[in-house]
Amino acid sequence: MKLRQSVRHEKMNKIAVIRGVSLNKWEMQNCEPLKEYYDITAFTTTHCKYDIGRINLPVVQLPFQSNGLTLYMEGLDDHLADMDLIYTGDISYLYSAQAVQAKRKYGCKVVCLEWENIPFNFEDNEAVARIRKVVRNEADHFIAVTNRAKEALLLEGVPEEMIDILPMGVDLRRFRPHPAAGHQYREILGVNNDDIIILFIGRMDWEKGIYDFVHAAAKVTRDQALQGVPVRFVMAGSGPELDEVRRRTAELGMADRFNFLENCPYEDIYKLHNAADFFVLPSVSVRYWQEQFGMVLIESMACAKPVISTLSGSIPEVVGDAGMLIQPNDYLSLYRAMKDLIENKERRMMFSENALTRAEEYFDSQKTAGNILEIFKKVLGTQKLTMSIQDMYRRGLTLRNEGRQEDALTTVCEAFNKDPDNKKILASLVEMAVEVNQVELAANSLRRHLLLHPANLDALYELSKILFALGKYDDAEEELNKISIFDPDREDAKILRKQIANEKYQPQEG
């Protein structure tokens, strides 16, 4: 469905879109239309990998801690407290586990956008395996961008009814056939209008097949049957292999045939596609990655350009009849496919028509946004199966006010067990436990909290008071000693220490 102009509700549901370091314009064009329906905010990190300046949504940047495979977004929990739904990324990300934790606390819904198409990927890492298990088991719904991503989720145990397949789209108002923009960009590149441009856009990483592209290009330039045919190669993107790829093209005597665009703004990408005659993405599968979708493929298709790509990952689902698919890691097959399209204009035109038709039918970001809207409405409309931690805590306070102290304590204990680092719930639990003379429960709850927050001086002081009341003087003094490390001048701790000394050393009768 396409989005129609919405009627704003008095109270719009609040949606958080979490993407860690990977927030980007090309995916967010599928979310931007939703702001007519929801109060939607995107969350990224203070150092994002991509330009976020043109994202047409409110964006919050948070500090983060990363140790390679896991990335923790600091302060995210505070921003999620009043969200109705959290739209997070793959189940492998720690911030997706943070979303699940927010669900436990606040009762919001969690929807995961799943690109990963390798079952149990990275689960040889214990931390990632734990994250994936938690998110897989507790998220409310999953959007798989391809059927292969859905199949991975199914194999991992996610029920089929919890998964919708929904490919991402591009803004067809921008990505469309635009000959004038193409001619203009050819002038920028210094390429004649009669030249055939073969285009690659992507990260300069080995698995993107960049060396196969260069080696196939070398075969094309040396092919006697193609002598006199003006062919140019354009590679747009940056990454660790860029300098080596440049060196390889020069070594092969093709420096004059190649244009390298290390930085091409996203708003100019449609011009680059329109300047090309066909697009090539020769991705190669590796152990921990295979092409998950290929947004650049649908950008090219929307500009009515044929594509050549590989039988790798989810690429066949995306390309369909819009181009040619070859074996990955095979530059000779890539050369033959390039030659075929160079020599056969009619074949290029056929793929061009198929590409545009396919893009308009399956990869329109407006349609994608409409489908996301329907999924969100479905998820938000489902009844809460469990009481949120905050609801549970508030219920405990209500029971206490009604004089049902034992029931109140039981309910608040349940909330604390789900969120043992919550200072507010802990304080109420300790107070209630002391009221009904369950001081051991209060002490044990404080100890559990202090495992997470050993420098919480108020908790240390409360534990010292309880231990003192139980006659455990040495244990009480031990907790006071911990307070002294951080705050030796804390007055209430000094007073309690004197009280303990008086009781501990006063003369015994008889």
Image: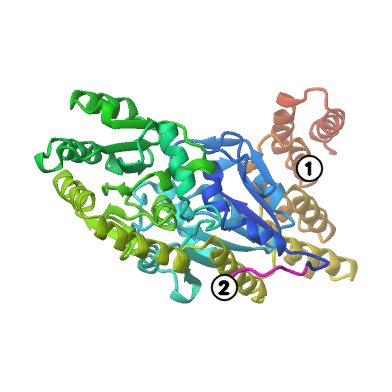
- 190 lies above or below 56: above
Kind of residue at badge 2: Met
**Which stretch appears magenta?**
1-7
In the foreground, 409 or 206: 206
Question: Can I make out residue 100 in this image?
Answer: no
Residue 277: give x, y in percent of width and height.
33, 48
Image side of residue 11 versus residue 358, left or right: right
- The quadrant the C terminus occupies is top right
Q: Is residue 381 magenta?
A: no
In the foreground, 281 or 348: 348
Mark 2 nearby-residue class (10 Å; few <14, some 14–19, many ≥20): few
Q: Residue at x 69, y 34 (%)?
A: 455
Q: Residue at x 78, y 46 (%)?
A: 466
Q: Label 1: state its secondary structure.
A: helix
The residue beneath circle 2 is 1
- Disc 1 to disc 2, how far (Cα)? 58 Å
In the foreground, 318 or 219: 219
